[in-house]
Image (spheres, coloured by chain):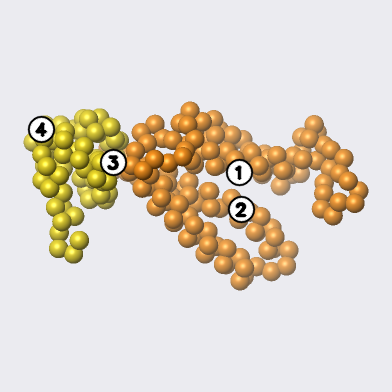
Chain colours: A yellow, B orange
């Protein structure tokens, strides 16, 4: 699973802490998602998409083998 | 996924109690330390009995405080914490089972009940090591990035 959370977050000029506060999760969770260590649930993916003003598909894309 | 967890305010007291009861368990095992007010009259026909409840109280306290500490809500509890808990629990059960198999296969005589009794705590201790260790490492990595 490839994700563009970091890129979209930086486009907004937000830190990991700010994005974490807007989605009501910990900073560690955002870090784990950005580094691909954790794949969020549908609820969190939708929340991330909402605060980053994009669709979920712009944040997460399937890779070959997924 | 919501988990049934103890409230966050119990985490610190449970950690302190863990330390206190661990010290008391060690004193009880190594130096036969007993609290006089926990003395009781054991029935004379009882097969396995003693005349003081200190070790039972210390071990129960240690086990319960470990449980509350391990399963109390974090201040920033979220779905990633749940995933970490699940992963840690899975690893703890796996390692606990391997140790249990080792005990069954390689310990004989008096050593078996002694080691098996100590093994009562390993699943919670292993879970705590894996879970808290992972959280600490993640916090460190997040701070470095």
What's the chain of the residue with tag 4?
A: A
> What residue do we see at 70% from left, 39% from top?
B57
Tell which of B145 and A50 is nearer to you.
Answer: A50
Quadrant assignment for the C terminus of chain A: bottom left
In the rendered image, which residue does mark 4 sit on? A12
C-alpha separation, residue under disc 3 versus residue under disc 2? 33 Å
C-alpha separation, residue under disc 1 versus residue under disc 4? 48 Å
What's the chain of the residue with tag 1?
A: B
* In the image: residue B98, left or right of residue A23: right
Q: Position of residue B69 (x, y in %)?
A: 51, 38
Q: Residues within 10 Å of mark 3 (few under 14, many from 20)?
A: many
**View extreme (left): residue:** A11
Does residue B96 lie above or below B144 as drawn? below
Among the 4 quarters of the image, the one containing residue A7: top left
Q: Which element type, helix, strand or loop, lies under badge 2?
A: helix
> What residue do we see at 36% from left, 33% from top?
B76
Both labels 1 and 3 in a single chain: no
In the rendered image, which residue does mark 2 sit on? B120
In the rendered image, which residue does mark 1 sit on? B63
In the rendered image, is residue B28 in sight? no
C-alpha separation, residue under disc 1 versus residue under disc 3? 30 Å
In the rendered image, which residue does mark 3 sit on? A29
Both labels 2 and 4 in a single chain: no
In the rendered image, is residue B10 in sight? yes
What's the chain of the residue with tag 2?
A: B
Quadrant assignment for the N terminus of chain A: bottom left
Q: Are marks 2 and 1 in contact (CB under 8 Å)?
A: yes
Q: Earlier in the sequence, mark 3 or mark 4?
A: 4
Q: Residues within 10 Å of mark 1 (few under 14, many from 20)?
A: some
Both labels 3 and 2 in a single chain: no
Q: Position of residue B129 (x, y in %)?
A: 46, 48
Q: Position of residue B34 (x, y in %)?
A: 77, 38
């Amino acid at each position: 699973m490839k994700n563009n959370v970091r890129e979209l977050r930086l486009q907004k000029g937000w830190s990991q802490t700010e994005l974490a506060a807007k989605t009501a999760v910990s900073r560690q969770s955002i870090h784990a998602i950005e580094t691909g260590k954790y794949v969020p649930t549908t609820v969190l993916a939708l929340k991330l998409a909402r605060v980053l003003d994009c669709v979920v598909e712009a944040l997460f894309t399937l890779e070959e083998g997924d | 996924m919501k988990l049934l967890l103890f409230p966050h305010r119990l985490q610190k007291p449970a950690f302190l109690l863990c330390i206190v009861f661990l010290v008391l368990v060690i004193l009880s095992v190594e130096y036969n330390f007993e609290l006089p007010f926990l003395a009781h009259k054991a029935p004379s026909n009882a097969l396995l009995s003693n005349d003081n409840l200190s070790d039972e109280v210390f071990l129960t306290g240690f086990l319960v405080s470990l449980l509350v500490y391990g399963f109390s809500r974090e201040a920033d509890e979220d779905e990633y914490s749940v995933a970490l808990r699940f992963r840690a629990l899975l690893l703890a059960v796996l390692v606990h089972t391997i140790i249990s198999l080792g005990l069954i296969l390689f310990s004989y005589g008096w050593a078996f009940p002694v080691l098996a009794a100590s093994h009562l705590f390993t699943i919670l201790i292993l879970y705590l090591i894996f879970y808290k260790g992972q959280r600490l490492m993640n916090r460190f990595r997040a701070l470095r990035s």
